[in-house]
Amino acid sequence: MSILQLTPNEPKIKRVLKKILFGKHLFCPYCRGKRIKAYEKRYHCRRCRKFFSLTSVSWLKGSKLPLQIIWLLLYCYTKKIPILQTQDLCGVTEPTVRRWFDSFRERLPEPEFERLSGIIQMDEMFKKEAMIIGAKQKGTKKVICVPHNKIAADRKDVVNFLEQYVTPYKSELWTDGASIYKGIQNYWPVWHTKDIHNKFEFSHTSEIEGIWANFRTFIRRMYHHITNAKLPEYLYEFCMRFSSPEIFDSPFSYLEKTLCLVSS
Ligand SMILES: [Zn+2]
C-alpha cells in the first residue's frame, strides 16, 4: 500500500477519534450533557456552554500538527520506521519526530503485572555504563527487564529481581555459569540449573540472549542511539512491543488502547 492509502483523510480520522473517545453518541466531557452543537472545528455544549474538540479532550491536546501528519507519525512509530526516515515521510524536523515518538511511548499502557513461573531464563546485558537484568519465561512472551545505572550486577541485584518478579517454589531458573547466580536457591526458593561450559550443549539462556540481540537491533535501527538516562523508557517500549504486539498493529489499535477522555 502506498503512503497515501495508509493515511485516512481528516474526516475519517475524526470519526475514528470520536468513536474511540465517545462511543456511539457524543456527549459533553464536562457535564455529560447530550445536547451538543457541532461547528467546523469544535463542539459546543448547550447545557454547560463549554467548547471542546476531539483533540482538546485527550492527550492530543495542544498539538499543532494536522491530524493526518499525526496519524502518519503514529503509523511510523507502530511500524518501527527509523527516526530519519519518518522525518522524510512526514515532512517534519527530527526533534518533532523524537518528541512525538516520546509522547507515543509515554502513553503506552501499563501491562498487567504477573510474576514469572515455570522455566525462567535469566541473564544480564551490558551497555556502556549501564546494565539490564532480564528474565524470560521459556516459550512465552513474558519478559521482565530491569535497568541499572552501573556496570556490573551482583548477587543482591539478582535476589531483588527474583523476590519481585519470580514465583517462589514454582520456578525453575536457568542461567549461565556466572558467579552471581551461585547458590541462588539459598536466597530465593527456585530450582536452579546452569550451563556447564560444554559448547555442544544447547545454551540455557538462548531465549533471553535472543531478547538482548533484538533489543540492540531495535535501538540501532529505529533510534540509532539512546542515552543511559532514557534507557528505562526505551526498554519499556521494547518489552511492550514484544509482549503486547497487538497494540502496535496499526495507528487505530494503538489509539484504541491509549486514548481516553481527560477532562481538565
Ligand atoms: Zn457540558
Image (cartoon, rainbow, N blue to C red):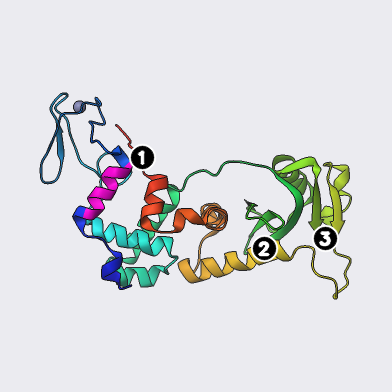
Mark 1: few/some/many CA within 10 Å (<14, 14-19, 20+): some
Mark 3: few/some/many CA within 10 Å (<14, 14-19, 20+): few
Asked if the beta carbon under badge 3 is closer than 8 A to the nearest atom of ligand 1, the reply is no
Name which residue lies at 22% across and 31% down.
Answer: 28
Name which residue lies at 80% across and 58% down.
Answer: 175
Q: Residue furthest front?
A: 24
Q: Position of residue 99 (x, y in %)?
A: 36, 56
228 vs 142, left or right, is: left
Taking the image as drawn, is residue 251 in sight?
yes
Q: What span is in magenta? A: 12-20
Asked if labels 1 and 2 touch by Cβ distance under 8 angstroms, the answer is no
Mark toward the start of the polypeptide (2 vs 3): 2
The Cα atoms of the two marked residues, 1 and 3, are separated by 46 Å
Quick one: SS at disc 3? loop
Q: Position of residue 226 (x, y in %)?
A: 51, 63
Q: Quadrant of the N terminus?
A: bottom left
Q: Quadrant of the C terminus?
A: top left
Residue at image mark 1: 260
Q: Which amino acid type is shown beneath numbered disc 1?
A: Cys
Q: Position of residue 221 (x, y in %)?
A: 49, 71
Q: Which amino acid type is shown beneath numbered disc 2?
A: Phe
The Cα atoms of the two marked residues, 2 and 3, are separated by 14 Å
Asked if labels 3 and 1 touch by Cβ distance under 8 angstroms, the answer is no
Above or below, comparing residue 202 to residue 191 in the picture: below
Residue at image mark 2: 126
Residue at image mark 3: 178
Quick one: SS at disc 2? strand
